[in-house]
Image (spheres, rainbow, N blue to C red):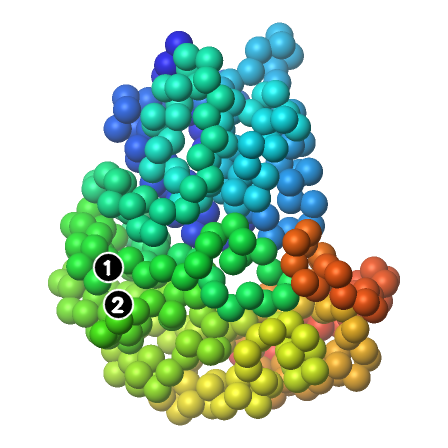
């Protein structure tokens, strides 16, 4: 029987939140109603593969959906764990009725109909752009709305699974982004947050990310523009100038660095040094003196010495972040870093994380 109610549980990044919203819109267009409790006829687990043991946690979440009377909802495994596991997910758990990757969720309504008839569909294909072409027009928006403009990653940092779960970098067409942004404003949005694995890598071959921001700036009714997440390699002078000249572009930049040690940055394949990163931030502050800076850090990357870690602390002191996110390194299966020698002991990672957070928090309080 076709489900009448649904619940979507999204984990991880803002892009997963966006994807979850779009899946909910498609299911609502099919006549289904969102349910608040655990008694929904269909549950979509929109998973994240960044954290340690992500797949195992996803299977645990699936198991908890079995009810006391032995019944359970239809279960869709979506997101990056679905992409990484594919059909193996259904071999590991008979409770998973369908598996849909992040580039194929526009097929979710069709897959739900198939699963309701007893099929067990799997779709982890990565078409270039057709997902966005197939999504319905957005008719509702909160005051702050997410808008995905870019997906995938070509950077291949040695610790990261994103290039394998989200695919190669693709940029949505200029016109599609503008039309969706206008529609969000008409639906009630006053702030748009542009999303991408490397959002500032957006390009249509002729125009770049800064050009897109300036075009969005001209939309009547749009009051604020934000974006996340950026890569230092894709920050250019045009984007820096936009921060100084576009009033709607909020004075905030989240720019991950991961380490202050050039030796570790090279091992991570980050394609920048501590010095080039700091130079970008200096230019940003010159263009927009009131800008709030944020970053990401990984402690305990394979081979990280105390000297390497001290370099990270020095970088934090020099930047004086308004906020930052820090994590212990966790090996992701299939990544080069997982096979590196000199894996760091957990107690050392925990000590460094505590010291790093203390330093970050001190600067945040002083901001």
Which residue does the numbered mark 2 point to in the structure image? 204
Nearer to the camera, 367 or 214: 214
Position of residue 163 relative to residue 24, above or below, is below
Pointer 2 with pointer 1, Cβ within 8 A: yes
Q: CA distance from mark 2 to mark 1?
A: 7 Å
Residue placed most toward the observer, 276 or 127: 127
Instruction: Find disc 1 in the rendering and name its residue.
Output: 173
Is there any visible trace of residue 2 in the rendered image? yes
Residue 26: quadrant of the picture:
top left
Query: Is residue 172 left or right of 37 when viewed as pictured?
Result: left
* Location of residue 224 in the rendering, given as x and y in whole percent from the top left corner: 28, 65
Asked if residue 242 is positioned above or below residue 181 in the image, the reply reads: below
- Which one is nearer the viewer's eye here, 217 or 224? 217
The answer to whether residue 45 of the structure is visible from this angle is no
Q: Residue at x 28, y 58 (%)?
A: 172
Q: Quadrant of residue 150?
A: bottom left
Q: Secondary structure at mark 1?
A: loop
Q: Position of residue 269 (x, y in %)?
A: 60, 74
Please state the horizontal and vertical placement of residue 349, each as a whole percent of the image.
79, 65
How many numbered marks does the figure carry? 2
Label 2: element kind: loop
* Residue visible at 41% across and 61% down in the picture: 169
Residue for point 47% across, 72% down: 231
Q: Quadrant of the N terminus?
A: top left
């Amino acid at each position: 029987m076709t489900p009448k109610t649904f619940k979507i549980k999204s984990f991880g990044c803002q892009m997963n939140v966006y994807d979850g919203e779009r899946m909910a819109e498609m299911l609502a267009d099919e006549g289904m109603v969102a349910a608040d409790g655990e008694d929904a006829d269909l549950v979509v687990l929109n998973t994240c593969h960044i954290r340690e043991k992500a797949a195992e946690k996803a299977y645990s979440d699936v198991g908890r959906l079995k009810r006391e009377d032995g019944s359970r909802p239809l279960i869709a495994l979506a997101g990056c764990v679905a992409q990484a596991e594919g059909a193996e997910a259904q071999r590991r758990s008979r409770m998973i009725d369908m598996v849909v990757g992040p580039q194929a969720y526009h097929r979710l309504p069709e897959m739900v109909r198939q699963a309701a008839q007893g099929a067990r569909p799997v779709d982890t294909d990565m078409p270039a752009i057709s997902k966005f072409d197939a999504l319905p027009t957005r008719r509702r928006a909160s005051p702050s709305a997410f808008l995905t403009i870019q997906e995938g990653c070509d950077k291949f940092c040695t610790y990261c699974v994103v290039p394998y779960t989200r695919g190669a970098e693709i940029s949505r067409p200029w016109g599609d982004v503008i039309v969706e942004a206008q529609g969000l404003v008409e639906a009630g949005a006053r702030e748009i947050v542009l999303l991408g694995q490397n959002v500032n890598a957006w390009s249509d071959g002729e125009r770049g990310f800064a050009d897109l921001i300036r075009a969005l700036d001209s939309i009547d009714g749009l009051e604020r523009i934000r974006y996340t997440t950026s890569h230092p390699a894709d920050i250019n002078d045009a984007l820096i100038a936009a921060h100084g000249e576009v009033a709607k572009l909020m004075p905030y930049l989240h720019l991950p660095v991961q380490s202050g040690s050039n030796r570790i940055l090279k091992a991570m394949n980050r394609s920048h040094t501590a010095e080039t990163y700091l130079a970008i931030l200096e230019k940003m502050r010159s263009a927009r003196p009131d800008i709030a800076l944020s970053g990401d850090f990984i402690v305990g990357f394979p081979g990280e010495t105390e000297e390497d870690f001290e370099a990270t602390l020095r970088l934090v002191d020099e930047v004086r972040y308004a906020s930052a996110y820090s994590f212990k390194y966790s090996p992701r299966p299939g990544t080069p870093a997982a096979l590196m020698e000199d894996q760091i002991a957990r107690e050392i990672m925990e000590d460094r994380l505590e010291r790093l957070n203390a330093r970050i928090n001190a600067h945040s309080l002083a901001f």
